Amino acid sequence: MDSKDIVIEGLGRIQTILTKALESLTPEQLTYRPHEQANSIAWLAWHLTRVQDNHLSSLAGREQAWVADGWHAKFGKPADARDNGHGDTPEQVAGFKPASAQLLLDYHNAVYARSVELVQQLSAADMDKPVDDPRYNPPPLVGVRLVSVLADNLQHAGQINYVRGLIEQRHWLGV
């Protein structure tokens, strides 16, 4: 199995987990926070998608779907490509109230399609190229950045399932 196929499989699993976890949630359930300092399911789903959109769009050298496709407006937020939730305050998390779970899924599905398109174009040699990111010295490799996105997204997908389990008072969603 080629490394890009492994990444695509991982991205697909995240999409599947997110789809099942958001299924039939009410607006109240989407924005439920088990503690005033905790994140809601809606915020976690948005954030994991923003991370994927940000990092993979950067690797592709193209504008994020968030801005390019007007997703920011659908969420009632400014066209700020840097807005991905990192550093949000508890008040900002509490104020994040998307119209529906479907809106979160639609944005994620659009980003997923763009992500798969990019990863399908990568060669094995591309995975070993350094990422143009001045925050790091030495810069991470493309393959390392992809694993970072997978790890981040899987962690947040697990958090979503945990919060849903708290809401429904059950331990396993069968995903």
Image (cartoon, helix red, strand yellow):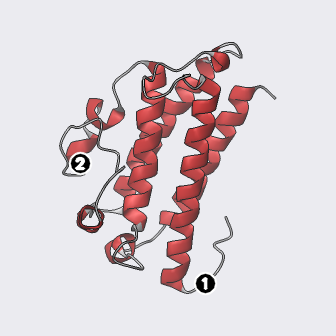
Against 130, residue 57 (above or below) is below
Placement of the N terminus among the 4 image quadrants? top right
Residue at 51% of width from left, 32% of height from top?
115
Mark 1, residue position:
170
Against 56, residue 110 (above or below) is below
The kind of residue on which mark 2 rests is: Lys
The kind of residue on which mark 1 rests is: Arg
Q: Which percent across, then down, holds residue 55?
A: 46, 33
Residue at 64% of width from left, 27% of height from top?
143
Residue at 64% of width from left, 35% of height from top?
8
Against 168, residue 9 (above or below) is above
Residue at 72% of width from left, 35% of height from top?
6
Residue 88, picture quadrant: bottom left
Q: Which percent across, then down, holds residue 32?
A: 37, 76
Residue furthest bottom as drawn: 169
- Relative side of 60 to 146, left or right: left
Rendered image: mark on residue 74? 2
Of labels 1 and 2, the one closer to you: 1
Task: Please report contact status of discs 1 and 2: CB closer than 8 Å, yes or no.
Answer: no
